[in-house]
Image (tube, rainbow, N blue to C red):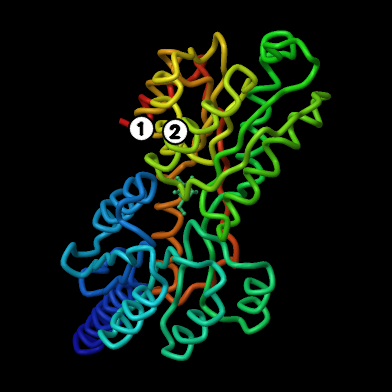
């Protein structure tokens, strides 16, 4: 009898030990939180881009907060050259990274890059510069571990136009001819963000019932200095005729402010100016009246979304082909709120 009780006790103990062991195993198999040995390769199209600098800083910090080691996160500057970036991707593959996060130099190179990375069996998260719909469909059809994380630039363009439209025709139509005379300062036209913001900012004005008159449309490549030059030249050529300056991003809008001030014009009084991104400086300018408004391009949500997709791929989970995020209008009413969230 005693023997039977002892062997029963021992059997119970063995089962319990096995169960505890299983629990430990299953949690480490799912990889929850243990990414210390995982290598992440990150390619940024150009380090000198203001917005992408905020983005990559947040991306690295968030990956570290998830348990990745700083030394296992390598971020490369593509120096705005696709050949350089493609080489960096090949080096990451040779180095055996567990996942790649890529901000393409040229969105049109997506198919080539996808083929190289998929052939190496490494999951791939594209960010910021969206590949074509055909390309995204290809990932889906082939069930590849490839996705895109970003916002729909049509929304940001629409919001820019709405910020101007909400001021009312009487306020914006400074020369009273019933039309809005504007100039457009575009980002890199290869980039869908530039194409959509250019198109949808004006469309929103037209949809709101405004007549529009484009005086100038120039490419400033997302760059502050180029933005300043373009707006300075346009102000010299069209002077008082210009009522609205649309910039595809805030860096170029900051350049526009310099040109506007140098020309002796005053935003909110004799000219209106909108950008996109909600850089800290731009939000401060919206608050002080140097800019009419901007649109928050949520680099925090996008960076977290990209890292979360990378983690899912590492864990062997399925990821949606497109992971979206919303833009937000920034006007003097909420600029402080956005600033507080950014700091
Ligand atoms: C941002 C720009 C940035 C560009 C880089 C856009 O979404 O608004 O500021 O230069 O991405 O691709």
Q: Quick check: marks 2 and 1 in contact, CB under 8 Å? A: yes
Looking at the image, which residue is at 44% across and 17% down?
290
Looking at the image, which residue is at 30% across and 74% down?
28
Q: Nearer the viewer, residue 33 or 335?
A: 335
Q: Secondary structure at mark 2?
A: loop
State which tag comes first along the sequence, 2 or 1: 2
Q: Nearer the viewer, residue 277 or 29?
A: 277
Q: Secondary structure at mark 1?
A: helix
Q: Which residue in the rendered view is the most extreme toward the front?
A: 237
Q: Quadrant of residue 71?
A: bottom left
For the residue with label 1, is its CB less than 8 Å from the closest atom of ligand 1?
no
Question: How many C-alpha atoms fall within 10 Å of the one at disc 1: few (<14), some, or many (≥20)?
Answer: some
If the image is split into quadrants, where does the C terminus sit? top left
Q: Nearer the viewer, mark 2 or mark 1?
A: 2
Residue marked by disc 2:
278
The x and y percentages for residue 333 are: 52, 14
Label at residue 275: none
Looking at the image, which residue is at 65% across and 29% down?
182
Looking at the image, which residue is at 32% across and 64% down?
79
Label at residue 342: 1
The x and y percentages for residue 324 are: 58, 52
147 is higher (above) or lower (below) than 164:
below
If the image is split into quadrants, where does the N terminus sit? bottom left
63 is higher (above) or lower (below) than 220:
below
Query: With 255 as the anchor, is 173 left or right in this view?
Result: right
Question: How many C-alpha atoms fall within 10 Å of the one at disc 2: few (<14), some, or many (≥20)?
Answer: many
């Amino acid at each position: 009898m005693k023997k039977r009780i002892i062997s029963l006790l021992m059997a119970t103990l063995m089962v319990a030990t096995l169960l505890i062991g299983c629990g430990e195993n299953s949690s480490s198999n799912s990889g929850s939180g243990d990414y210390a040995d995982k290598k992440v390769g990150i390619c940024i199209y150009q380090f000198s881009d203001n917005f992408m600098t905020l983005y990559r800083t947040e991306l690295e910090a968030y990956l570290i907060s998830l348990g990745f080691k700083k030394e296992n996160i390598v971020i490369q500057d593509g120096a705005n050259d696709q050949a350089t970036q493609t080489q960096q991707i090949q080096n990451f593959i040779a180095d055996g990274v567990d996942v790649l996060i890529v901000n393409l130099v040229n969105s049109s190179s997506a198919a080539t890059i996808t083929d190289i990375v998929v052939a190496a069996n490494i999951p791939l998260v594209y960010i910021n510069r969206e590949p074509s719909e055909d390309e995204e469909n290809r990932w889906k059809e082939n069930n590849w571990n490839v996705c895109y994380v970003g916002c729909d630039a049509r929304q940001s363009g629409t919001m820019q136009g709405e910020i101007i439209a909400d001021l009312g025709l009487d306020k914006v139509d400074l020369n009273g001819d019933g039309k809005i005379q504007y100039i457009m300062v575009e980002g890199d036209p290869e980039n869908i963000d530039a194409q959509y913001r250019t198109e949808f900012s004006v469309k929103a004005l037209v949809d709101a019932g405004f007549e529009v008159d484009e005086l100038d449309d120039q490419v400033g490549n997302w760059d502050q200095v180029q933005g300043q030059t373009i707006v300075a030249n346009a102000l010299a050529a069209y002077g008082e005729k210009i009522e609205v300056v649309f910039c595809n991003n805030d860096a170029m809008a900051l350049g526009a402010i310099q040109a506007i001030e140098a020309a002796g014009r005053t935003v909110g009084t004799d000219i209106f100016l909108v950008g996109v991104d909600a850089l800290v400086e731009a939000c401060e300018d919206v608050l002080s009246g140097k800019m009419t408004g901007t649109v928050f391009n949520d680099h925090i949500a996008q960076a977290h979304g990209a890292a979360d997709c990378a983690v899912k791929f590492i864990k062997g989970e399925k990821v949606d082909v497109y992971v979206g995020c919303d833009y937000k209008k920034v006007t003097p009413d909420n600029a402080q709120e956005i600033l507080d969230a950014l700091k």
